[in-house]
Amino acid sequence: MMWIFNIFFGGAIYLVYKVFKIKPQPWNIAIFVTIFCMALISMLTVWTQCSPYSTRAVVGRYVVPIVPWVQGQIVNISAKPNVLIKKGDVLFEIDPTSYQYAVNQAKAAFEAARSDEARLAAGVLVAEANIAKMEADVRVAKSDFEMADAAATAISKQELIQAKEKYVAVQAGLKQAEANRDQAIASRVASRDAVVVAEEKLKTAEFSLVQCIVRAPSNGFVTNWQISEGTFVVPWPA
């Protein structure tokens, strides 16, 4: 804009003094100087109002702090400072030894919980089979008692008492078998819950193990690189 103004004003002076041959006089020079100053001031005033400027410059950028999910000592650094990296590229690796141990323990606990569930499921089947046997014994004992009671005049009183006691005993055994079955079912339900808990612990341990490899959350550059191999990092956004 200033170049255009200077060219236009210089052309006007050239036309007046060179083309039209007007002799320079103090009064016409004063007129040109006054016009130049007034035009310059007016242009600058309009310029500052329509296109404001500032002596301060602020540069903005998106910064993503890298905070690991797990803590440990860094054993390998793959990323390079100020080199373009893509989302998912490996930045650095944390020592996975303790997390691998946790995965192994959680896996063993999960397998033990599954075995315990299978054992208790088999116990339920045994209890149900025992109930079926006791029900059959109850029917036999009941039939023997009824026959002994009907033939009370033909048999001794002692045999009748024995038949009755046997019938009562097998009834009690049936109730005990039913209680054992209910207990086995409750234990099996608890074992299923234990399997679910063990599986979730295994998934958590596996997740922590995977997080030992820290990857880039997005495309960009690593500019504020403050770690080196051997640095101990923690999952704390500082």
Image (cartoon, rainbow, N blue to C red):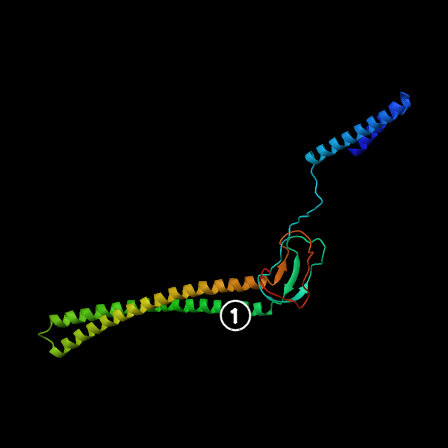
Q: Name the quadrant containing residue 208.
A: bottom right
Q: Compare residues 48 and 94 and report the one nearer the observer.
A: 48
Q: Name the quadrant containing residue 20.
A: top right
Q: Compare residues 27 and 104 and report the one nearer the observer.
A: 27
Disc 1 element:
helix
Q: Compare residues 205 and 164 and report the one nearer the observer.
A: 205
Which residue is found at the position 37% from the left and 67% from the top? 187
Q: Is residue 223 left or right of residue 117?
A: right
Q: Position of residue 77 (x, y in %)?
A: 68, 63
Q: Is residue 100 left or right of residue 43?
A: left
The residue indicated by pointer 1 is 105
Query: Extreme top residue here?
Result: 20
Q: Position of residue 120 (x, y in %)?
A: 39, 68
Q: Amino acid at mark 1?
A: Gln
The answer to whether residue 183 is visible is yes
How many dots with numbers? 1
Q: Position of residue 24 (x, y in %)?
A: 89, 25
Q: Name the quadrant containing residue 47.
A: top right
